[in-house]
Amino acid sequence: MKQIRKRGYIKCIGWILCVFLLCFNSGEKMTYIRELSSNITLEQLEELRQNTGGLLSLEEKDIRQVSGDMSETLGKNNISVRMMGIPIKQVSYDAKEDIRLMPGGMPIGVSLYSDGVLVVGLGSINKNADICPAAEGGIKAGDVIVKVNGKTVEDSFHLSELCSEGGDLNFTVRRDDSTIECTVTPVYDEESGGYLAGMWVRDSTSGIGTLSYWDMTAKRFGALGHPITDIDTGAIIDVKNGNIIKSSIIGISAGSSGKPGEVIGSFSVHDEKWGEIDKNCEYGVYGDAINMPVNPLYPEGMSICWWDEVHTGAAEILCTVTDEGIKEYDCEIIKLFPAEGSGSKGIVLKITSEELISITGGIVQGMSGSPIIQDGKLVGAVTHVLVNDPTRGYGIFIENMLKAVE
Protein backbone atom coordinates (compact mmCIF):
# COMPACT_ATOMS: atom_id res chain seq x y z
CA MET A 1 0.00 0.00 0.00
CA LYS A 2 2.84 2.41 0.91
CA GLN A 3 4.57 1.71 -2.41
CA ILE A 4 1.32 2.41 -4.29
CA ARG A 5 0.95 5.73 -2.44
CA LYS A 6 4.60 6.57 -3.12
CA ARG A 7 4.18 5.89 -6.82
CA GLY A 8 1.03 8.01 -6.77
CA TYR A 9 2.88 10.90 -5.12
CA ILE A 10 5.69 10.69 -7.71
CA LYS A 11 3.17 10.54 -10.53
CA CYS A 12 1.33 13.53 -9.11
CA ILE A 13 4.55 15.51 -8.71
CA GLY A 14 5.48 14.55 -12.27
CA TRP A 15 2.14 15.83 -13.57
CA ILE A 16 2.51 19.06 -11.59
CA LEU A 17 6.04 19.52 -12.93
CA CYS A 18 4.88 18.87 -16.50
CA VAL A 19 2.05 21.38 -16.13
CA PHE A 20 4.50 23.90 -14.65
CA LEU A 21 7.02 23.42 -17.46
CA LEU A 22 4.25 23.59 -20.05
CA CYS A 23 2.99 26.83 -18.60
CA PHE A 24 6.52 28.17 -18.27
CA ASN A 25 7.35 27.14 -21.85
CA SER A 26 4.32 29.00 -23.18
CA GLY A 27 5.02 31.99 -20.98
CA GLU A 28 6.31 35.40 -21.96
CA LYS A 29 10.00 34.72 -21.22
CA MET A 30 10.24 31.47 -23.18
CA THR A 31 8.25 32.92 -26.06
CA TYR A 32 10.69 35.80 -26.16
CA ILE A 33 13.69 33.42 -26.17
CA ARG A 34 12.24 31.18 -28.87
CA GLU A 35 11.62 34.17 -31.14
CA LEU A 36 15.07 35.61 -30.52
CA SER A 37 17.36 35.62 -33.57
CA SER A 38 20.53 33.53 -33.46
CA ASN A 39 22.52 36.76 -34.09
CA ILE A 40 21.62 39.58 -31.75
CA THR A 41 22.68 43.18 -31.21
CA LEU A 42 24.18 44.62 -28.03
CA GLU A 43 20.78 46.15 -27.21
CA GLN A 44 19.12 42.73 -27.56
CA LEU A 45 21.85 41.22 -25.39
CA GLU A 46 21.01 43.62 -22.58
CA GLU A 47 17.31 42.83 -22.99
CA LEU A 48 18.10 39.08 -22.90
CA ARG A 49 19.97 39.51 -19.63
CA GLN A 50 16.96 41.28 -18.16
CA ASN A 51 14.69 38.40 -19.22
CA THR A 52 16.74 35.66 -17.55
CA GLY A 53 16.96 34.64 -13.96
CA GLY A 54 15.48 31.91 -11.78
CA LEU A 55 15.24 28.80 -13.99
CA LEU A 56 16.92 30.59 -16.89
CA SER A 57 20.61 31.43 -16.97
CA LEU A 58 23.23 32.56 -19.49
CA GLU A 59 26.65 31.09 -20.14
CA GLU A 60 28.83 33.48 -22.13
CA LYS A 61 31.93 32.28 -23.99
CA ASP A 62 34.77 33.86 -25.96
CA ILE A 63 33.99 37.33 -24.72
CA ARG A 64 36.31 39.82 -26.43
CA GLN A 65 35.92 43.50 -25.64
CA VAL A 66 36.85 46.12 -28.20
CA SER A 67 39.16 48.79 -26.84
CA GLY A 68 38.86 52.42 -27.81
CA ASP A 69 41.97 52.32 -30.01
CA MET A 70 40.77 49.17 -31.82
CA SER A 71 43.79 47.26 -30.47
CA GLU A 72 41.83 44.03 -30.03
CA THR A 73 40.15 42.00 -32.73
CA LEU A 74 36.42 42.13 -33.25
CA GLY A 75 34.67 38.78 -33.14
CA LYS A 76 31.51 36.83 -32.48
CA ASN A 77 30.74 36.13 -28.83
CA ASN A 78 28.66 33.04 -28.08
CA ILE A 79 25.93 32.75 -25.44
CA SER A 80 24.18 29.60 -24.28
CA VAL A 81 20.68 30.13 -22.83
CA ARG A 82 20.08 27.42 -20.21
CA MET A 83 17.06 26.24 -18.26
CA MET A 84 18.03 24.55 -15.01
CA GLY A 85 21.54 24.13 -16.48
CA ILE A 86 20.29 22.45 -19.68
CA PRO A 87 21.14 24.37 -22.91
CA ILE A 88 18.01 25.35 -24.84
CA LYS A 89 19.27 28.00 -27.28
CA GLN A 90 22.55 29.34 -28.71
CA VAL A 91 22.90 32.98 -29.76
CA SER A 92 25.84 35.20 -30.69
CA TYR A 93 26.54 38.90 -30.88
CA ASP A 94 29.20 41.25 -32.22
CA ALA A 95 31.10 43.20 -29.59
CA LYS A 96 30.87 46.56 -31.32
CA GLU A 97 31.43 49.77 -29.48
CA ASP A 98 29.81 53.06 -30.36
CA ILE A 99 32.99 54.69 -31.62
CA ARG A 100 32.68 58.40 -32.34
CA LEU A 101 34.99 60.26 -34.69
CA MET A 102 35.21 63.75 -36.09
CA PRO A 103 34.55 63.44 -39.85
CA GLY A 104 36.94 65.28 -42.15
CA GLY A 105 36.23 66.68 -45.59
CA MET A 106 38.90 69.39 -45.37
CA PRO A 107 41.61 69.62 -48.07
CA ILE A 108 45.07 68.77 -46.78
CA GLY A 109 48.57 69.13 -48.08
CA VAL A 110 50.58 65.94 -47.58
CA SER A 111 54.35 66.17 -47.18
CA LEU A 112 56.06 62.79 -46.82
CA TYR A 113 59.71 61.80 -46.30
CA SER A 114 60.72 58.22 -46.99
CA ASP A 115 62.52 55.87 -44.65
CA GLY A 116 65.60 55.42 -46.81
CA VAL A 117 66.12 56.62 -50.38
CA LEU A 118 63.93 55.24 -53.17
CA VAL A 119 65.55 54.28 -56.48
CA VAL A 120 63.23 55.57 -59.21
CA GLY A 121 65.41 54.82 -62.26
CA LEU A 122 68.75 53.53 -63.55
CA GLY A 123 70.96 54.68 -66.44
CA SER A 124 74.49 55.01 -67.77
CA ILE A 125 76.62 57.60 -66.03
CA ASN A 126 77.27 59.62 -69.19
CA LYS A 127 76.81 59.60 -72.93
CA ASN A 128 80.24 58.10 -73.62
CA ALA A 129 80.37 55.36 -71.00
CA ASP A 130 77.68 52.74 -71.41
CA ILE A 131 77.94 51.58 -67.81
CA CYS A 132 75.58 51.61 -64.82
CA PRO A 133 77.38 50.62 -61.60
CA ALA A 134 74.10 50.39 -59.64
CA ALA A 135 72.55 47.96 -62.14
CA GLU A 136 75.75 45.89 -62.27
CA GLY A 137 75.67 45.69 -58.49
CA GLY A 138 72.11 44.30 -58.50
CA ILE A 139 70.15 47.48 -57.69
CA LYS A 140 66.67 47.72 -59.26
CA ALA A 141 64.14 50.51 -59.68
CA GLY A 142 61.82 50.41 -56.67
CA ASP A 143 64.56 49.41 -54.23
CA VAL A 144 64.96 51.48 -51.07
CA ILE A 145 68.56 52.11 -50.03
CA VAL A 146 68.70 52.21 -46.24
CA LYS A 147 72.43 51.86 -45.50
CA VAL A 148 75.80 52.28 -47.20
CA ASN A 149 78.75 50.53 -45.53
CA GLY A 150 76.64 50.24 -42.37
CA LYS A 151 75.77 53.96 -42.25
CA THR A 152 72.07 54.85 -42.26
CA VAL A 153 71.13 56.89 -45.34
CA GLU A 154 69.36 60.08 -44.23
CA ASP A 155 68.36 61.50 -47.62
CA SER A 156 69.42 61.68 -51.26
CA PHE A 157 72.13 64.29 -50.55
CA HIS A 158 73.59 62.07 -47.84
CA LEU A 159 73.61 59.10 -50.26
CA SER A 160 75.53 61.21 -52.77
CA GLU A 161 78.09 62.02 -50.08
CA LEU A 162 78.50 58.35 -49.14
CA CYS A 163 79.15 57.45 -52.78
CA SER A 164 81.56 60.36 -53.40
CA GLU A 165 84.76 58.53 -52.41
CA GLY A 166 84.27 55.62 -54.81
CA GLY A 167 85.51 52.10 -54.16
CA ASP A 168 83.37 49.06 -53.41
CA LEU A 169 80.35 50.09 -51.36
CA ASN A 170 78.04 47.71 -49.53
CA PHE A 171 74.41 48.78 -50.01
CA THR A 172 71.73 47.51 -47.64
CA VAL A 173 68.56 47.52 -49.71
CA ARG A 174 64.91 46.94 -48.84
CA ARG A 175 63.11 45.18 -51.69
CA ASP A 176 59.44 44.26 -51.23
CA ASP A 177 59.32 42.52 -47.83
CA SER A 178 62.98 41.48 -47.65
CA THR A 179 66.37 43.08 -47.05
CA ILE A 180 69.30 42.28 -49.34
CA GLU A 181 72.94 43.31 -49.65
CA CYS A 182 74.45 44.64 -52.89
CA THR A 183 77.98 45.71 -53.76
CA VAL A 184 78.13 48.85 -55.92
CA THR A 185 81.32 50.38 -57.30
CA PRO A 186 80.71 54.00 -58.37
CA VAL A 187 82.64 55.17 -61.44
CA TYR A 188 84.44 58.49 -61.73
CA ASP A 189 82.76 60.83 -64.20
CA GLU A 190 85.00 63.54 -65.61
CA GLU A 191 82.10 65.66 -66.77
CA SER A 192 80.64 66.04 -63.29
CA GLY A 193 83.94 65.66 -61.48
CA GLY A 194 82.73 63.01 -59.07
CA TYR A 195 81.85 59.36 -58.57
CA LEU A 196 78.45 58.27 -59.87
CA ALA A 197 76.42 55.08 -59.42
CA GLY A 198 74.03 55.64 -62.33
CA MET A 199 70.71 55.92 -60.55
CA TRP A 200 67.99 58.47 -59.91
CA VAL A 201 66.65 58.60 -56.37
CA ARG A 202 63.92 60.34 -54.41
CA ASP A 203 63.49 60.86 -50.68
CA SER A 204 60.25 62.85 -50.43
CA THR A 205 56.91 63.53 -52.08
CA SER A 206 53.97 65.87 -51.61
CA GLY A 207 50.43 66.34 -52.86
CA ILE A 208 46.83 67.28 -52.11
CA GLY A 209 44.21 65.02 -50.52
CA THR A 210 41.29 65.06 -48.10
CA LEU A 211 41.18 64.40 -44.38
CA SER A 212 38.90 61.42 -43.61
CA TYR A 213 38.57 61.59 -39.82
CA TRP A 214 40.28 62.25 -36.58
CA ASP A 215 39.75 60.54 -33.25
CA MET A 216 38.99 63.13 -30.57
CA THR A 217 39.96 60.68 -27.80
CA ALA A 218 43.05 58.94 -29.16
CA LYS A 219 44.21 62.10 -30.98
CA ARG A 220 44.89 60.15 -34.18
CA PHE A 221 43.86 60.89 -37.76
CA GLY A 222 43.32 58.99 -41.00
CA ALA A 223 43.33 60.35 -44.53
CA LEU A 224 43.16 59.40 -48.24
CA GLY A 225 41.99 55.79 -47.76
CA HIS A 226 44.70 54.56 -50.15
CA PRO A 227 48.50 54.59 -49.99
CA ILE A 228 50.85 57.27 -51.23
CA THR A 229 52.97 55.61 -53.90
CA ASP A 230 55.95 56.76 -55.91
CA ILE A 231 54.85 58.21 -59.25
CA ASP A 232 57.60 56.41 -61.17
CA THR A 233 57.76 52.97 -59.55
CA GLY A 234 54.29 52.60 -58.01
CA ALA A 235 55.88 51.41 -54.77
CA ILE A 236 54.26 52.33 -51.42
CA ILE A 237 56.58 54.82 -49.77
CA ASP A 238 57.90 53.74 -46.39
CA VAL A 239 57.49 56.66 -44.00
CA LYS A 240 60.29 58.16 -41.97
CA ASN A 241 58.21 61.21 -41.12
CA GLY A 242 55.76 63.62 -42.68
CA ASN A 243 52.99 66.10 -42.05
CA ILE A 244 49.47 66.94 -43.08
CA ILE A 245 49.08 70.67 -43.53
CA LYS A 246 46.17 73.05 -43.94
CA SER A 247 45.56 73.58 -47.65
CA SER A 248 43.64 75.99 -49.86
CA ILE A 249 41.67 75.08 -52.99
CA ILE A 250 42.65 77.36 -55.88
CA GLY A 251 40.89 75.59 -58.74
CA ILE A 252 39.27 72.46 -60.16
CA SER A 253 40.17 70.58 -63.31
CA ALA A 254 36.92 68.75 -64.02
CA GLY A 255 37.02 65.08 -64.95
CA SER A 256 35.46 63.44 -67.99
CA SER A 257 35.33 59.94 -69.45
CA GLY A 258 38.90 58.73 -69.92
CA LYS A 259 40.40 61.85 -68.34
CA PRO A 260 40.57 62.06 -64.52
CA GLY A 261 40.05 65.51 -63.07
CA GLU A 262 41.97 67.13 -60.25
CA VAL A 263 41.56 69.38 -57.24
CA ILE A 264 44.21 72.08 -57.56
CA GLY A 265 45.38 73.03 -54.09
CA SER A 266 48.10 75.08 -52.52
CA PHE A 267 50.02 74.70 -49.26
CA SER A 268 53.34 75.63 -47.76
CA VAL A 269 55.52 74.12 -45.06
CA HIS A 270 54.89 77.38 -43.21
CA ASP A 271 51.12 76.80 -43.17
CA GLU A 272 49.33 75.41 -40.11
CA LYS A 273 50.36 71.81 -39.40
CA TRP A 274 47.39 69.60 -38.49
CA GLY A 275 49.13 66.28 -37.87
CA GLU A 276 52.30 64.22 -38.07
CA ILE A 277 52.33 61.17 -40.34
CA ASP A 278 53.83 57.95 -39.03
CA LYS A 279 52.16 55.35 -41.25
CA ASN A 280 51.52 54.99 -44.98
CA CYS A 281 49.83 51.74 -45.95
CA GLU A 282 47.29 50.28 -48.37
CA TYR A 283 44.48 51.87 -46.29
CA GLY A 284 45.82 55.44 -46.31
CA VAL A 285 48.03 57.68 -44.21
CA TYR A 286 47.76 57.92 -40.42
CA GLY A 287 49.41 59.74 -37.56
CA ASP A 288 49.11 61.93 -34.51
CA ALA A 289 46.63 64.80 -34.60
CA ILE A 290 48.05 68.15 -33.49
CA ASN A 291 45.79 71.10 -34.32
CA MET A 292 42.90 69.35 -36.04
CA PRO A 293 39.94 71.53 -37.06
CA VAL A 294 36.35 70.88 -36.03
CA ASN A 295 33.97 69.95 -38.82
CA PRO A 296 31.34 72.74 -38.74
CA LEU A 297 28.64 70.37 -40.03
CA TYR A 298 29.22 67.84 -37.23
CA PRO A 299 30.92 69.73 -34.38
CA GLU A 300 30.23 66.90 -31.89
CA GLY A 301 31.53 64.19 -34.24
CA MET A 302 29.49 61.14 -35.27
CA SER A 303 29.24 57.40 -34.66
CA ILE A 304 30.87 55.04 -37.13
CA CYS A 305 28.85 52.59 -39.18
CA TRP A 306 30.17 49.02 -39.08
CA TRP A 307 30.46 47.40 -42.50
CA ASP A 308 27.60 44.96 -41.95
CA GLU A 309 25.30 47.90 -41.16
CA VAL A 310 26.09 49.67 -44.45
CA HIS A 311 23.50 49.16 -47.19
CA THR A 312 22.99 50.12 -50.80
CA GLY A 313 21.04 53.31 -51.36
CA ALA A 314 21.26 57.00 -50.60
CA ALA A 315 24.35 58.42 -48.90
CA GLU A 316 26.43 61.61 -48.86
CA ILE A 317 30.07 62.55 -49.18
CA LEU A 318 31.80 65.45 -47.42
CA CYS A 319 34.36 67.40 -49.40
CA THR A 320 35.68 70.88 -50.17
CA VAL A 321 35.66 71.91 -53.82
CA THR A 322 34.82 75.61 -53.54
CA ASP A 323 35.68 78.51 -51.25
CA GLU A 324 32.41 77.85 -49.41
CA GLY A 325 34.19 75.16 -47.41
CA ILE A 326 32.97 71.68 -46.51
CA LYS A 327 29.62 70.69 -48.01
CA GLU A 328 27.54 67.52 -48.20
CA TYR A 329 26.89 66.16 -51.67
CA ASP A 330 24.44 63.37 -52.51
CA CYS A 331 25.69 60.01 -53.74
CA GLU A 332 24.38 56.46 -53.94
CA ILE A 333 26.04 53.30 -52.68
CA ILE A 334 25.42 50.83 -55.50
CA LYS A 335 27.46 47.80 -54.44
CA LEU A 336 29.18 46.43 -51.34
CA PHE A 337 31.86 43.83 -50.70
CA PRO A 338 32.76 42.26 -47.32
CA ALA A 339 35.18 44.43 -45.36
CA GLU A 340 37.68 41.63 -44.95
CA GLY A 341 39.73 41.32 -48.10
CA SER A 342 38.20 44.32 -49.88
CA GLY A 343 41.06 46.67 -49.02
CA SER A 344 40.38 50.19 -50.20
CA LYS A 345 37.65 49.10 -52.65
CA GLY A 346 34.85 47.71 -50.48
CA ILE A 347 32.25 50.28 -51.52
CA VAL A 348 31.11 51.16 -55.03
CA LEU A 349 29.38 54.54 -55.18
CA LYS A 350 27.90 56.94 -57.71
CA ILE A 351 27.78 60.71 -57.36
CA THR A 352 24.19 61.91 -57.80
CA SER A 353 24.62 65.55 -56.77
CA GLU A 354 24.12 67.71 -59.85
CA GLU A 355 25.95 70.53 -58.09
CA LEU A 356 29.10 68.46 -57.50
CA ILE A 357 28.99 67.01 -61.02
CA SER A 358 28.74 70.51 -62.47
CA ILE A 359 31.84 71.58 -60.53
CA THR A 360 34.11 68.53 -60.75
CA GLY A 361 32.47 66.11 -63.19
CA GLY A 362 32.25 63.61 -60.31
CA ILE A 363 35.17 62.20 -58.33
CA VAL A 364 38.55 63.79 -59.05
CA GLN A 365 42.10 63.46 -57.75
CA GLY A 366 42.41 65.25 -54.42
CA MET A 367 38.99 64.06 -53.24
CA SER A 368 40.53 60.81 -51.99
CA GLY A 369 39.68 60.54 -48.31
CA SER A 370 36.34 62.38 -48.55
CA PRO A 371 34.10 60.92 -45.81
CA ILE A 372 31.07 58.84 -46.83
CA ILE A 373 28.01 59.35 -44.60
CA GLN A 374 24.90 57.15 -44.45
CA ASP A 375 22.00 57.30 -41.98
CA GLY A 376 23.88 59.87 -39.92
CA LYS A 377 26.93 57.63 -39.44
CA LEU A 378 30.48 57.62 -40.83
CA VAL A 379 30.67 54.74 -43.31
CA GLY A 380 34.12 55.23 -44.81
CA ALA A 381 35.96 57.34 -47.37
CA VAL A 382 36.22 57.81 -51.14
CA THR A 383 39.39 56.24 -52.56
CA HIS A 384 39.31 55.84 -56.35
CA VAL A 385 37.49 57.05 -59.45
CA LEU A 386 36.49 54.92 -62.43
CA VAL A 387 38.39 56.51 -65.31
CA ASN A 388 35.69 55.73 -67.90
CA ASP A 389 32.94 57.21 -65.66
CA PRO A 390 34.08 59.90 -63.19
CA THR A 391 30.68 59.92 -61.49
CA ARG A 392 31.48 56.45 -60.13
CA GLY A 393 34.22 55.29 -57.84
CA TYR A 394 35.29 53.18 -54.89
CA GLY A 395 35.39 53.73 -51.17
CA ILE A 396 36.93 52.08 -48.13
CA PHE A 397 35.02 51.04 -45.00
CA ILE A 398 35.87 53.09 -41.90
CA GLU A 399 36.27 49.74 -40.14
CA ASN A 400 39.24 48.93 -42.39
CA MET A 401 40.75 52.35 -41.79
CA LEU A 402 40.54 51.86 -38.02
CA LYS A 403 42.08 48.39 -38.25
CA ALA A 404 45.04 49.93 -40.08
CA VAL A 405 46.04 51.80 -36.92
CA GLU A 406 45.83 48.84 -34.51
Image (cartoon, rainbow, N blue to C red):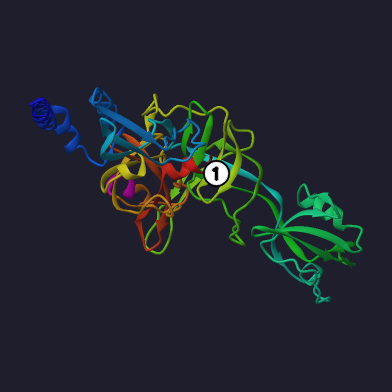
Q: Residue visible at 74% across and 58% down?
A: 173
Left or right for 298, reference 8: right
Q: Residue visible at 48% across and 36% down?
A: 70
Q: Quadrant of the N terminus?
A: top left
What amino acid is labelled 1 in the image?
A: Val
Name of the residue lying farthest toward the front: 1
Left or right for 353, reference 303: left
Which is more toward the observer, 353 or 103?
103
Instruction: Indicate the position of residue 34 as horizontal and vertical percent values.
Output: 17, 37
The stretch in magenta equals: 352-358
Q: Which residue position holds label 1?
A: 285
- The residue carrying pointer 1 sits among few (fewer than 14), some (14 to 19) or many (20 or more) residues within 10 Å by Cα, namely many
Query: Where is 219 relative to 153, above or below?
Result: above
Instruction: Indicate the position of residue 40 as horizontal and vertical percent values.
Output: 28, 37
Count of all numbered marks drawn on residues in the image: 1
Which is more toward the observer, 144 or 341?
341
Instruction: Indicate the position of residue 93 as horizontal and vertical percent values.
Output: 33, 38
Residue 355: say if magenta: yes
